[in-house]
Amino acid sequence: MDIDGVFACVLSQLAVAQLHLVEGSELTDDDRVSILTVAAREQALDRAMSLLAARPRSVQEVEQRLRFLKFDTAVISATIAKLRDLGVLDDRSFAHFWREERDTYRPHGRQLLNQELRARGVAPDTVAEVLPSEEEELELARRSLARRLGRFQGESWQEFQHVFYPFLARRGFSHEVIQRTLRETWRKQQCEPES
């Protein structure tokens, strides 16, 4: 859209209709401000939707990205509100998505999952809803360890612990879960005949 013969912004046809703009009409200063505000909101919404198209995001992640893109606070707030109203931005859904992705591709323990979600601005009560139970965490640790067992060439319990304890600890599993997983796996490995 041109204002006073100079390109000012891009507006959707819907915004043009909502603002009752007609080509060649006189614009007041208030009209100019309204036009630029609507254009900024449309652009911020477009950027946020593009971001969310790649993968779900937390509210904080979207806010940070829009701040990085230099949108002002009022535009960011309006965009976040619109995305929530549309149902495409929700920290609870994001937390469930994050947990599911981790469980499927790179299982993490409660500690690391908690840290990751909190770092993305998810509220503690929402994080608590998605953290795995102790039994689920134990199963996740078993799966993580099972993927790495083929690389183990050591022969002693000490070597086994030395190799796999740090691996599971980096994945955020608790000491108790790691010890239980290592003991169970070691016993199972010792009882199985070599192929």
Image (spheres, rainbow, N blue to C red):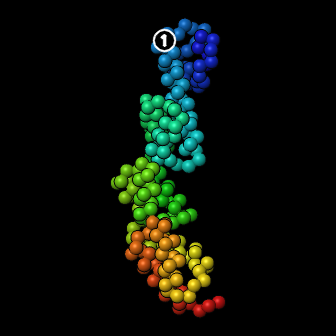
Q: Quarter of the image containing the N terminus?
A: top right
Q: Position of residue 29 (x, y in %)?
A: 48, 11
For this orientation, the residue located farthest to the right is: 195
- Mark 1 Cα within 10 Å, few/some/many (few <14, many 20+)? few
Quadrant for residue 149, please give it.
bottom right
In the rendered image of this protein, does residue 79 appear above or below residue 56? above
Secondary structure found at label 1: helix
In the rendered image of this protein, does residue 57 appear above or below residue 44? below
Q: Is residue 139 visible?
A: no
Q: Quarter of the image containing the C terminus?
A: bottom right
Q: What amino acid type is highlighted by mark number 1?
A: Asp
Viewer-proximal residue among 40 and 100? 40
For this orientation, the residue located farthest to the left is: 125
Give the residue drawn at x 57%, y 8%.
25
Give the residue drawn at x 54%, y 35%.
69
Give the residue drawn at x 49%, y 14%.
31
Q: Position of residue 30 (x, y in %)?
A: 46, 14
Q: Is residue 191 visible?
A: yes
Left or right: 11 with respect to 175? right
In the rendered image of this protein, does residue 84 appear above or below residue 10? below
In the rendered image of this protein, does residue 71 appear above or below residue 172? above
Q: Position of residue 109 (x, y in %)?
A: 45, 66
Quadrant for residue 17, please give it.
top right
Q: How many marks?
A: 1
Give the residue drawn at x 46%, y 34%.
76
Q: Position of residue 146 (x, y in %)?
A: 55, 76
Q: Which residue is mark 1?
A: 29
